[in-house]
Amino acid sequence: MSAVLEVDRNGPLFTSQRTSLRRTSLTNRDTHRIRKRSLALISFLEEVKMATGHTEKDSTNQKLQFAPFCSALEAGFWHQLTQKKLNDYRLDESPRSIKGYFYNGDPAGLPTRLTLEFSAFDATGPTPARCCTALGTLYNMNTFEAFKTFDKKLLLEKEANEIWESVQSETVLENPSLLTKFILLTFADLKKYRFYYWFCFPALCFAEGIQVLQPPVPLEEKFSQKQIAALQGAYDDLCNERGTTAIPYFLMKYTGEAVLLSSLHNWNTFFKGQKKVTVGVYDPCTLSQHPGWPLRNLLVLIASKWGSVLDAVEVLCFRDQTLQGKRSIQHSIVFQIKLPELSLSTGCPKSVGWEKNQKGVMGPRMVNLSECMDPKRLAESSVDLNLKLMRWRLVPSLDLEKVVSTKCLLLGAGTLGCNVARTLMGWGVRHITFVDNAKISYSNPVRQPLYEFEDCLGGGKSKALAAVERLKKIFPGVSAEGHNMSIPMPGHPVDFSEVTMAQARQDVEQLEALVSAHDVVFLLMDTRESRWLPTVIAASQRKVVINAALGFDTFVVMRHGLKKPKHVESGGSSPSSASCTPVSASTSSSSSSSTPGGPALVPGASLFSNIPGHRLGCYFCNDVVAPGDSTRDRTLDQQCTVSRPGLAMIAGALAVELMISILQHPEGGYAVASSSDDRMNEPPTSLGLAPHQIRGFLSRFDNVLPASLAFDKCTACSTIVLDNYEREGFQFLSKVFNSSHSFLEDLTGLTLLHQETQAAERGSGPGREQVPHGPLAAAPEESGRRGVRHLCADVKKLFFVPLG
């Protein structure tokens, strides 16, 4: 018989439109489907014809035949198997307990179905009302080759022996569902959403056939209407007594008007001394001349336990239909048989049960769900597939839910922004927001992968809006937004008029709202000063910030230090965990003090190590000058980001990977910074290190991992800047926008630091110790505003890294 695939077209994976019904021409695929269905129908009709043909013979020679189970797997079952395979089973091929059910109320013409749906994996869960439970075992193979070569004969014998042992031990008398066990062998091709499966319904066989003494007749020909009503009432009473809505097997006695029913375990008392007995089976078959598969193992049980004392067994195939609101059991059938002898002392009888495929031959079946799945959900499942496979062997502890739920704000939709967005989507991040005020120019598409030539026409589309449009075309499941707005910057006055001041205030408020609504902020802009305001806002709101900046062949990717929550700032412990390795008092003193007399840098030694996340510096902590207008009086090559084409892809990918490592760390943004010295140590996260900075040098294909403490005179994240911002708000910000860089330098104490440094240099002479200042303790020959130097302890020398 052919399998019936129950597809829930209102389910989350499937479209509701049945487009195949509206086709006006048949494709090759349609023809193939019709041919398969025709063959299945012919096979079914031949079985019916064969079964009916036997009734024309002499009843003394007639042997009892059974309608085999036909597997009916709903789409929800395959969806659940997919989730179990990806999240739970992974590479484990161990057998799993599942359950199905069968129903005795199907209309005539339907096969004897055993149904598995989404709840099949909850073996102890409820069964649909008026349905009988079938216990099963799932064997899900990792490869198609393992599926094909699995020893099915051995598997059937194993299950048959278990049934036989339960018969010998009389366990089935208390738990009759053990007689209707099944096996499901599967292989799930999750890339193509093709599922290969083979059902087995183990049935123990008699050495010789079962003789039919009286052929099947409808119940209404055997019982009176009063007896039928009494039978229906007795069955309901027995179900209520057992606390269920369906019983697979029962014992029966009947007289003129009375019908008595009992459970299997009461056989000896219910049928005491009887040579002829009547048993009932909950029968899912719809054929009028044949019982269904569940009867087979029951007859083996009866023959092995009581067959030697029985002359005949009358069988009631109980079928309970409800049509148009009216319940009827009259189409049940009754027949009489003579059971062959079967001794418990003999070995397990021969067994059968593997299901035929759609062609009517022994072989597996295949269902292709990709054709009926919603393409958007299919894309989403495929994206998740690649990520979940990481947890099978490589990173079992990977927390993908945390990654997928993270909301990312990308400030800048240029070369870095495009590459960061693509990598975020590769990691399954669903919430991405762009902020940019530029339009797409003709030079952009070759370096910025979210744009095309057509986006440049007509003056160019807005980068932020075009990037969102392209992300949704790449992956419809992404939740993306774009904001075409400017970010006010230090050194770029906004006090030209009331209109410009109002616009700046609106931009600040919108940026504050966007930062508040997201979990991670990426700083991916072209200029240094454009990063100042987001740095201040994110530091105030305690948001994780990932910064990426490019030189010609160098780059820096870093995470900003995450300030302690305000309610614990007064304490000295880490906000995330007391286990953070504390920074030594001497290191803390040398990093935060700007007064003469601090400890000098020890040559050849690492400057910082084991810095907790709340003490790490931001993008501006390594500067001794405040940000200003970096675009004024610049040549064309200085106005554009001139870098080697592959640099942005490398930096963008590292920025996202740094975020992922932080998310996987148990302390999140407060994680202690890893350095180059930690490369040979046990990594702190399942994905490896969690550095503060990654500084790359493409000319020598090298990366280093420096770490630096927050600078107490930082123009962006220092306490005095954050206090003024939180107290005065836009009033303070407008002073920064409309003033020169000296405003922030005076506020933070950098002006005094410059004066002390110059005075110290003028007073220094031979044999006099040089006093370092600032967070990186700059070399003595460096002074004031001459440039920004970064100390890399790993290469034991000072080096310059251009900051975009």
Image (spheres, grey):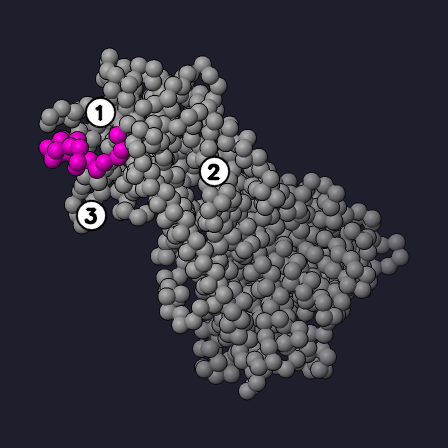
Q: Quadrant of the C terminus?
A: bottom right
Which comes before the other along the chain, label 1 or label 2? 1
Measured Cα–Cα span from mark 1 to mark 2: 32 Å
The image quarter containing residue 554 is bottom right
Tag on residue 354? 2
Q: Amino acid at mark 3?
A: Leu
* Magenta region includes residue 401: no
Foreground pick, 425 / 131: 131
Looking at the rendered image, the disc whose residue lies closer to the viewer, 2 or 3, is 2
Identity of the residue furthest to the right in this view: 766
Q: Measured along the vertical axis of the image, is residue 128 above or below residue 368?
A: above
Helix, strand or loop at label 2? It is strand
Please report the residue visible at 24 percent of the width from the left and 15 percent of the height from the top: 274
Residue 417, percent from left and from top: 60, 67
Which comes before the other along the chain, label 2 or label 3? 3
Q: Is residue 744 visible?
A: no
Tag on residue 323? 3
